[in-house]
Amino acid sequence: MKPKLLIAAIFFSGLAMAQLKPSDSTKAEKTNEIQAVTITKQVFKKESDRFVYDVAASPVAKGSTTFDLLKQTPLISSTDDKSLTIAGKGNTVIYINGRKSNMDADSLAQFLKNTPSENIQKIEVITMPGSEYQVEANDGIINIILKKKTSDGLNGNMRMSNTQSKYNESSASLSLNYRKDKLGISANITGGEDIEAQYYELANGTSENSNTSVGRIDDPNKNIGGYLNIDYQLTEKSNLALTWNTWANRSYGASINLFNTIKFLNDKAIEDYRYNISDNIENARSYNNNFNLNYELKTDSLGSKLNLNAAYLTYKRIQNSTNDTWLSDANANYIEKSQTIFQSIPQKINNFSGMVDYIKKFKNDFTISVGGNYNKTKTDNDTKYETQFYIPSKDTKYEPNYFIYDENIYGLYLTLEKKFSDKFSGKIGTRYEITNSVGTSDHAPIDRPDMARVEQNYKKLLPYLSLNYAINEKNNLSYAFSSRMRRPSFWELNPVRNILTENNYTQNNPFVKAASSYNNELTYMFHNAYFMVLSHSYFKDVITQVPLQRTLDVPRLDDNGNPMENQNGEPIIDKVQQLRYIRTNFGDKQTMSAMLGMQKSFFKQYWTANLTLGVQHNRNNGSLSIDPTTGDVFSEYINKTNSTSFVIKTSNNIRLDKAKTWFAGVNFFYVDKQQIELGMLKSLSSLDLSIKKLWNNWTFALNLSDVLRTNIIKIEDIQANGNYNKVLNDQFRRGVTVSLTYNFGNQKVKKVRNIDSAADDIKSRTR
């Protein structure tokens, strides 16, 4: 995760549940495979444990990106234009052809935004994954099925786009599909350049002591990446496949500029002000590579099969930053530099994993799925801090910390599925996971020797139940229950401190333990067009970032670093407000939601509408007053507030001519205000418009995003003790995008063979 974006991370972790929508990142159905067909219009239907949206020949999938196509899929939306969420779910895991993407969140978002939607055969939405899936908490799954050639030859597409928001950004991609006899190859290369701009207003404190920071972030990025899939049919019953996903990012010259106003009571108990400017410059680059080797053997004519997977994941990030604090006046004029902090925060992640799955099908519509997985992960974090003090002058302070984290995960699952009749079927399963981890630090604080070695071992039995009842041809009812746990991301465990301002920073925590979740869901589907989803999730030991505040008595120093005294010879003491965002476990939480949706065409398919209306209720129960990494005592932060909010999401595709060459799009979402871990998140909304022209093998598209400029994040929290914390974040989402797509070659396609990656449960934890 980029430190320059950590301000956003402060509240994005709590924002996930606030979005009706899924990184740093769906498994193929193992018991009832859905046979793909070539169609001439989009189809939305319910199949066993998932919703299926077939877009192969739909104009919705022309001239767009995979990310935009997903936003127009029923039950899926995005409020931050970076992550995707399934309605009523906390996070969403992206699978591609049945394999979990192992990119970090930033890389995955860029990859989806640069991959042409023409590559997509269909989209599967799994709201309640079964025991055979390796997912966390109440995560949902989006499985993107890519097109594949059915005859010998070559086809593909090229796409170029340019976007103008606050800054200009451009991207281009090339996708190829090749088939020759038993060999199939698909590949994509994509790249782009952009500057992510943000504006912030941060305020915290009390009526007497407070900090206010106002300023901007400019984050220039250059990206390149893609994928390579090679699938070879060894015999009529066996296949061998190799998959490589890669992404590289370079971000040099990223800047944070914040003007800080510090209000405090001086030694005479009179309100006083100090001003300074935080100038942060960061250079970073990252590399993400994942390799997966798959062997599949069909063992009988009923569809029984054995799947073997071996995978290697490597992630490397190199980042260095210089954080200058300048004394200033009330008009933000620079006066003199007071201190500089040099930070080096590299991270390496290496993961070796293996997975075995066997699916046995019987003639009486009975299926047994059994399997296991092993993951070994090592992270290497050689962090260095160097602080130089100018005013007052003091000795340079060095704070190195070399943190090594080793983790071993063992998992076994068993799933039984039975079709009792044409109307009733069920699935029951369980997953047993063992996690052994050790984190070591060579520079633990003297007063915290327990941070030198943090060892955590836990075992979890995770049951699953699913029942499906087809009332008749038009009505379907299903229920599912699952128990999951959410392990902390690797970057959350690294005890690194990220400086925002002189009195405001974030702190990760090696003591964070896994959280538990228990999920219930009831789904009703009518005529493959209308649906209702009722869900409830209970989370125990929620992992989040908690804002802790306290007032410090700070001796006033002269330019030489000596304490200043008043006329009576007493030290002059100023009261200054400090804010720390601590990553930790924070109580329990419940979420309840009711969603009504529709995916239907009207007026002879001139208008295709996707509509979701819902209500969500959040119940929070958490409190914290001690920094678990230092033992420092703060004013107690309490979040026991409940909230009920409404959500609306609609996507509309309108055909403008009889020849089916002109199309318009009108998309809108609204998320009502609701309580999250950090406070009350104000309402969010966005209106997006588009128009596209199809001409032979060319697609021309024009998209306008956040037309009304209403997608601006605002969070406010006021505690009973008088402490307050406010965040305003504007990411300049209003913009215009022009794109050009060209399709070439034989466009005949067939269903891709789904391959499950052995590294499935690692991706989401690199975000």
Image (spheres, rainbow, N blue to C red):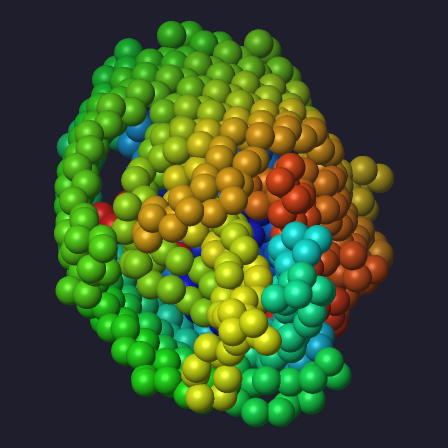
Examine the rendered structure and indicate whether residue 456 appears above or below residue 580: above
From the viewer's perspective, tell me whether residue 149 is left or right of residue 605: left
Q: Residue 535: horizontal and vertical position, in percent? A: 55, 24
| Residue 380 location (% of width, % of height) | 21, 65
Specify whether 597 is left or right of 508. Answer: right
Q: Position of residue 204 (x, y in %)?
A: 63, 56
**Residue 279: horizontal and vertical position, in percent?**
54, 82
- Along the line of sight, the residue nearer the viewer: 657 or 413: 413
Q: Quadrant of the N terminus?
A: bottom left
State the residue in front, 554 or 413: 554
Residue 146 lies left or right of residue 242; in this view the side is right
Relative to 569, does residue 355 appear above or below in the rendering? above
From what the image shows, is residue 620 above or below residue 334? Answer: above
Q: Determine the residue positioned at 59% across, 76% down.
A: 567
Q: Quadrant of residue 696?
A: bottom right
Q: Residue at x 59, y 84 (%)?
A: 327
The answer to whether residue 207 is visible is yes
User: Which of the pair 258/730 is nearer the observer?
Assistant: 258
Q: Residue at x 48, y 20 (%)?
A: 520
Q: Quadrant of residue 128?
A: top left
